[in-house]
Image (cartoon, helix red, strand yellow):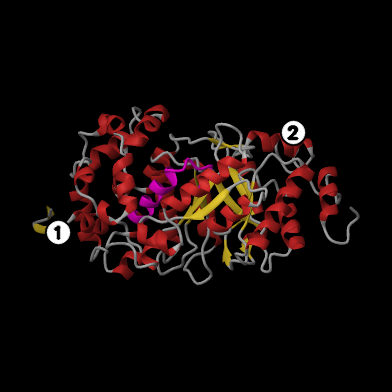
Amino acid sequence: MAYATTLEGTRFTFPDLRGLLAKATPERSGDQLAGLCAEGPVERLAAQIALADLPLKTFLAEELIPSDADEVSDLIARRHDARAFAPVASLTVGAFREWLLSPAADAAALAALAPGLTPEMVAAVSKLCRLQDLVAITAKRPVVTRFRSTIGLPGRLATRNQPNHPTDSSAGILISALDGLLMGSGDAMIGVNPATDSLPDYIRIVELLETLRLRLNVPTQHCCLGHVTVAIEAMGRGAPVDLVFQSVAGSQKANAGFGVDLAILREAAEAGRALGRCPEGGQFMYFETGQGSALSADAHWGVDQQTMEARAYAVAREFDPLLVNTVVGFIGPEYLYNGKQIIRAGLEDHFCGKLLGLPMGVDVCYTNHADADGEDMDALLTLLCAAGVNFVITVPGADDVMLNYQSLSHHDAVFARETLGRPPAPEFEAWLRAVRITDAQGRLAGASGELPPALEEASRLLPGRAA
């Protein structure tokens, strides 16, 4: 079905829904690479006007990717809740934006609506939003999850302590993890991206993190971000796996490029639940996504990268995850060219995930060949805190020495805590005070030159220290 609008006497026609969504998308290099973008700001505005007049229910009648050829589309169609959708079923995309900004769209209303929304709907409305809208709407939508810590409570910001090491050195991982804990980072989890994806290394890393957690009695959870099939095998051998991780994307073909499908993810979820480590009613799955992943795998079906990203959230939503994060600037400038595009993409991803009911975090990051810098990341972090992001990732000095990209530093988390008033998860906050890393006001306790007693004990895990 074609869509059209007239702007200042010029008739603009868009041959199908995929083309309309792509042309309405704010400028980004990935859509330019794919040949999907608007020819310029006038055509983009025309597409946005046409999109604003489009009934939301159009997305239920016209699939972007056919269900009979794609299990993600089939999942989206099967899981749509018509009763939850009913309150907004008569709205256009533009009217939906106005409703989202109104007082009627409070936390309870947004939570009730989530099962009735499809990824394509939330992607469409995000294309009509300015940054301020993306912040204002998601600030009203907390999504709370729990394992040993409670993540996503309003007014709080959790962090993933990411102690990566180029050779997966146990000592290097421990030193980096302790560095993060001393700066108050790690309430979302302590998570290592392994340099290799072998089963022995996976088991060694989760056992190392488990020893650290138990020695310090830290109220957090840990994860080795190896492939989910490795995690399944490790769980079968009784390894202490807290969080089950996998990168996911918005089409069956793109997920196949990651070596997964929905059946494998279900097997992993069943194995993780069977371990019994997660408290009853809690969550333990962890997913990462990123704009451009489907395009880089030639698995985007002619759909713009931001809409494909939102479709990945349907996969994540199926498994009731503890954490989901978009690694927003990691894939590179071929997909998000500069700081402006990265900032917008981070807020879009957070917006779409939250409206779909996901506990969204963002890896505020960029690669060294992108036209971006630390000041862009400062801006994105501050906007995300205003928007109520569940968690961010922090590394020593903002430089991940294994993945070779720039993320946030542990010091950035201190800024968010002390300047923006975003304390960590309550269980972790209490632990930080108990071990004297922070004071009664939640500020770092100061450089005395001595480790707090609990961390002095943990340092004995390092080679060369007494057991």
Between 115 and 205, the one lying in front of the other is: 205
Decide which of tag 1 and tag 2 comes sooner along the chain.
1
Q: Nearer the viewer, mark 1 or mark 2?
A: 1
The location of residue 92, given as percent across then percent down, is 21, 40
Tell me the residue at 19%/41% (across/down): 55
The location of residue 166, given as percent across then percent down, is 66, 68
Say left or right for 464 vs 118: right
Cβ atoms at labels 1 and 2 below 8 Å apart: no
Callout 1 crowding tier (Cα within 10 Å): few <14, some 14–19, many ≥20: few
Say left or right for 390 vs 464: left
Above/below status of 30 relative to 266: below
Tell me the residue at 56%/40% (across/down): 273
Is residue 190 in sight in this rendering?
yes
Residue 310 sits inside the magenta stretch: yes
Magenta stretch, residue numbers: 307-324
The location of residue 5, given as percent across then percent down, is 12, 52
Say left or right for 425 vs 141: right
- The dot on residue 15 is 1
Say left or right for 174 vs 22: right
Q: CA separation, marks 1 and 2?
A: 61 Å
Residue 51 sits inside the magenta stretch: no
Residue type marked 2: Ala
Q: In the current view of this chain or complex, which residue is farthest to the front?
A: 236
Q: For numbered disc 1, what is the local secondary structure?
A: loop
Q: In the current view of this chain or complex, which residue is farthest to the right?
A: 466
Read off the residue under disc 2: 440
| Residue 93 in which image quadrant | top left
